[in-house]
Amino acid sequence: MKQFIRKLFGIDKILAEKEQAQSETAKAKADEIQAKLTPKERATARGESWVAVLDTKVNPDNVRNGFFELDWNDNFITELKKAGYGFDNDPEEEIVDRWFRDLARNMLAEEGLDSNRSSGYINVTKLGGGKAEVE
């Protein structure tokens, strides 16, 4: 009987529209929250590994030297450990440094260049908050 009355007076449509509006509002709020997150926070929330180059600088006096400022999440460190770049007690910066050095060697090898050549040094400076500066 309730259904009949709801249908007769159009209450069922009003209730459906209200439910749709609430759903759209909830989705809009979720989208707004996602929009405020950084790419790192979004990847972390999804359980994905994430690493990015935040800054690159070249020494104006010697273009062979410069640095990359890297940022990463815990999932990336876990992935690197699984790949053999580190162990549980290793500092994150050292784990990322091993990976970064390997990445640089692989890029040189792909270009047919000698990866054992002298072309500067790599210095890792901890910046805190899961960030490090690689020079």
Image (cartoon, grey):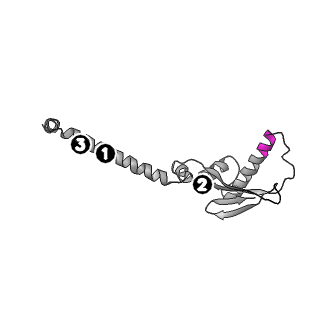
User: N-terminal of the two: label 2 or label 1?
Assistant: 1
Q: CA distance from mark 3 to mark 1?
A: 10 Å
- Give the residue number, with chain letter if any, for mark 3: 15
Q: CA distance from mark 2 to mark 1?
A: 38 Å
Q: Quadrant of the N terminus?
A: top left
Residue range corresponding to the magenta coloring: 105-117
Q: Secondary structure at mark 3?
A: helix
Q: Are marks 2 and 3 in contact (CB under 8 Å)?
A: no
Question: What kind of residue is marked 2?
Answer: Asp
Q: CA distance from mark 2 to mark 3?
A: 45 Å
- Give the residue number, with chain letter if any, for mark 2: 74
User: N-terminal of the two: label 3 or label 1?
Assistant: 3
Q: Is residue 104 magenta?
A: no
Q: Give the side of residue 65 with respect to residue 32, left or right.
A: right
Of badges 2 and 1, nearer the viewer stands 1
Q: Quadrant of the C terminus?
A: bottom right
